[in-house]
Amino acid sequence: MLKYIISKIKKIYPDPESEKAIMGSVVYCIHHKEGCQWSDELRKLKAHLNTCKHDAVLCAAQCGAMIPRVLMQDHLRYTCPRRRANCEHCHKEFSGSALEEHQGNCGHEPVYCENKCGAKVQRRHTQQHIQQHCSKRLVPCKHCGQSYTQDTVSAHGASCARAPVACPQRCGASGVPRADLAAHLRDHAAAAAAAALPCSFRDAGCRFKGTRQALEKHTEESCQQHLALVSALASRQARQLDSLRAAVARLSVNCSGALVWRISDWAAKMAEAKCKDGVELVSPAFYTSQYGYKLQASLFLNGNGAGEATHMSVYIKILPGEYDALLRWPFAHTVSFTLFDQSSSPDRACNIVESFVPDPTWKNFQRPSKEPDALGFGFPRFVSHEMLKKRNFIKDDVMFLRVKVDPSKIVAV
Ligand SMILES: [Zn+2]
Ligand SMILES: [Zn+2]
Ligand SMILES: [Zn+2]
Ligand SMILES: [Zn+2]
Ligand SMILES: [Zn+2]
Ligand SMILES: [Zn+2]
Ligand SMILES: [Zn+2]
């Protein structure tokens, strides 16, 4: 460069004097623009350039490149193809060009996993990482066989339909798949229902059913409830009994207006009447009709009042009845008493009949109070003891007495 410049000057100024003058002129270093401050006579420039730090010289490592002195150290260290350098990852020594090729391939360089798991592993271990350790590698669910990334497979297991779960009934069945649990529990329910025993207080209203153990526990725990159920049942049954009794009484009551009274053990009863005062036999109560007067006959075998010791006396009593409020008072119906002659030939039989029409002024025929009068109305001298011995009024120690009420005009409403 310098030679070229000087030869140009020599052509322009062929005169040696003027060449001398030119060589003595003051110039700047040709690297003035790059920052060199040197300035002196032109003839000294050549010598300066031999040391100018901005002037390019051949690479000291003989790579062939021209490098400014000031950059030589950097060139030798970093860019010269003939430099020697160590790989920062594997620390092996390379020439510059070999290092450039080596970079990007070094097996020791940490690189991000290509599955984007976030892990950095040395390049030589990436295959092993992807196959064995990467959290994003696909693994099969051991229950259903479907593929999941390794970091989600356990979360999947918490909901995998084929993953085994423990039976909440603790039946001991091992590994019921989650999807089959509902059916499994239905089986339990069906079996339990089939084996369920009813509570022994079922008839009292307890609806419990269960296994033998459950039933034992229930029976132990439910004393109070069972007692209440039984008590309620007893009350219900008592009410039913009451209404049944009333129904039976209604059905068995005599509502015909006529009573045929059978007096058995006659001789013994007569003997008792003779040795005791006022022995009275009373008949079952009877009604003149379904809603009529309630009556009862009474009999003194040894007589009373005017017939005492000589006659058998009969009376009719009006008892307080359920329909008295609807009936006409005083009682005004004819009453007749018939003592049957039990003769074996009926056409020769001769019954004794007495009847009376009630006297409306007689207090016995007024509506009876709760405590009826001891004595009714009737015949103190119904039949004499002499007459009783005749005919067949007593046969087989039995006597029959009929009490009959004239059925007309009984009910007032
Ligand atoms: Zn210079
Ligand atoms: Zn070089
Ligand atoms: Zn390396
Ligand atoms: Zn990975
Ligand atoms: Zn699964
Ligand atoms: Zn089970
Ligand atoms: Zn029970």
Image (spheres, rainbow, N blue to C red):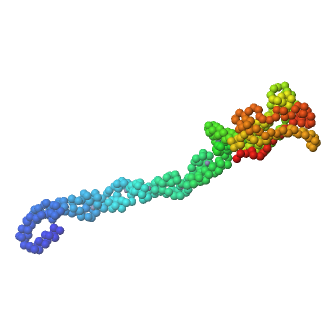
Residue 342 x/y as whole percent: 90, 39
Kindly identify the residue that appears in the image at 10 percent across and 74 percent down: 12
Residue 327 x/y as whole percent: 71, 43
Kindly identify the residue that appears in the image at 89 percent across and 35 percent down: 394
State which image quarter holds ligand 3.
bottom left
Kindly identify the residue that appears in the image at 26 percent across and 64 percent down: 65
Residue 399 x/y as whole percent: 87, 36
Kindly identify the residue that appears in the image at 63 percent across and 38 percent down: 228
Left or right: 152, with 57 as reference point: right
Left or right: 54, with 268 as reference point: left
In terms of depth relative to the viewer, which is nearer, 221 or 260? Answer: 260
Image-quadrant location for residue 179: bottom right
Residue 109, visible in the rendered structure: yes
Residue 259 x/y as whole percent: 81, 40
In terms of depth relative to the viewer, which is nearer, 190 or 275? Answer: 275
In terms of depth relative to the viewer, which is nearer, 48 or 140? Answer: 140
Vertical order, 118 against 230 (above or below): below
Vertical order, 145 against 17 (above or below): above
Vertical order, 392 against 3 (above or below): above
In terms of depth relative to the viewer, which is nearer, 80 or 22? Answer: 80
